[in-house]
Image: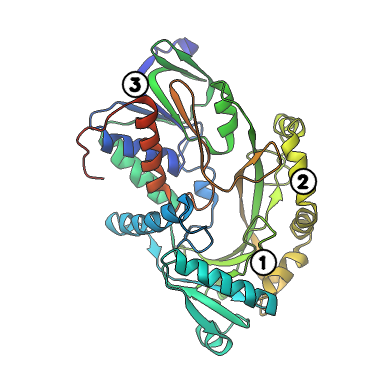
Amino acid sequence: MLSGQPEATSDVVVVGGGIIGVATALELTRRWPGISVTLVEKEASLAAHQTGHNSGVIHAGVYYAPGSLKAEFCRRGSQAIYEFAAEHGIAHERCGKLIVATTELEVERLQALKARCEANGLDPEPIDAARLRELEPNISGLEAIRVASSGIVDYPAITRAMADIATGRGVTIRLGEEVIAMSETMSGVSVTTDRGRIAAGYAIVCAGLMADRLAGMCDLDLDFRVVPFRGEYYRLPERCRDIVRHLIYPVPDPDLPFLGVHLTRMVGGYITVGPNAVLALAREGYRWRDVNLRDLGELARFGGFWRTLRANARSGLGEMRNSIWRRGYLQACRKYCPSLRLENLTPYPAGVRAQAVGRDGTLLHDFLVRRSRASLHVCNAPSPAATSSMPIAQYVVDQFGEAFGIQPANPVAA
């Protein structure tokens, strides 16, 4: 045993204390009342990485292919988040989103986006230039669509509230404990941490930025790798807190992998601008000076990484330029918000996105769940994972039950 600690035993061990891991632990207790669940998180607090560093947006499901899991999970998840936040007194606001076209080409793309909204069961409102000026005097555009069901919420608070319910149902949460090895035994799974060992019948791994590493510990075929992309944000000063009433998004370029820089109202009452998307030099590289040689070495040895760089070289160089050169970032913002000035862009903490990339260099945009003999791994949970956390957890637990032949008991209320 490590550190002289006795071996803990549990029916299921969940690895990862982000919103997906916590929601999964909670769903296990709903599906099988009385099940013993241990959740392990290497940081000293829950929601320390992607959950705690995102934009806080409750997505409505604008961009996702009709009939896809992402579209369905987003639709169900957004409603669940609103209801959960209201029930537990968590800060949230249904402020709506405006997607703004500033060129004739973007107007054409906006029409296709409007059709996709309608196919996903949303009710996008067409907005002409005059109406746009009425709604948002500081925003400039030729046309827009408004999606009223988009909003904002405090996702770390959502995660903590879920954890409180889960611990009330008997889930053990072990913080500040990093998984350093996993192996499958005759009776299930042995999880070795830097503070001891946990013996469990099964493991569900929701490790985000470390998903491929933990999958590799269980000898799964790693035909993908996690590539970290840092999203850098700026915060507008207090005098700009009323510059917009909605979430303001540009029309996305279908040839680019990310949505572009947008203005986001935050539940704290201020406005952020961002994110861009630059390659991070560490899996948890929130700053340029955060460099991890192991992380970089793994990327260098993965052919899919170089194929992705070649395929996205032009956009990648542009994102890097804007990261280094703040005036370039400002130009992207002024495209639809011309009143912004350089002095308005004040530093704000960045986030790092775990982007799964295939061997052929393809960015994986859908959910990727893999299983071994006694473990289930959420290898990719792309945006809008926070919005969709509750239906994702239900899906993961469905997969868990089917994979290992476990029948649901009489579930308790969520």
Q: Earlier in the sequence, mark 3 or mark 2?
A: 3
At 36% from the left and 37% from the top, the residue drawn is 398
Image quadrant occupied by the C terminus:
top left
Q: Name the residue type under label 2.
A: Leu
- Using the image, tell me which numbered label, if any, was put on residue 10: 3
Q: Amino acid at mark 3?
A: Ser
Q: Position of residue 179 (x, y in %)?
A: 52, 24
User: Can the viewer see residue 7?
Assistant: yes
Of 276 and 253, which appears nearest the observer? 253
On the image, the x and y values in percent for residue 155 come to 44, 52
In the image, residue 332 above or below residue 91: below
Q: Is residue 23 left or right of residue 385?
A: left
Comparing marks 1 and 3, which lies closer to the viewer? Answer: 3
In the image, residue 273 sits, relative to residue 206, either above or below, namely below
Q: In front: 276, or 357?
A: 357
At x 63%, y 40%, the residue is 284
Left or right: residue 412 compared with residue 187: left
**Secondary structure of residue under mark 1:** loop
**Residue 309 has which mark?**
2
Other residues around mark 1 within 10 Å, as few (<14) / some (14–19) / many (≥20): some
Q: Residue at x 51, y 43 (%)?
A: 367
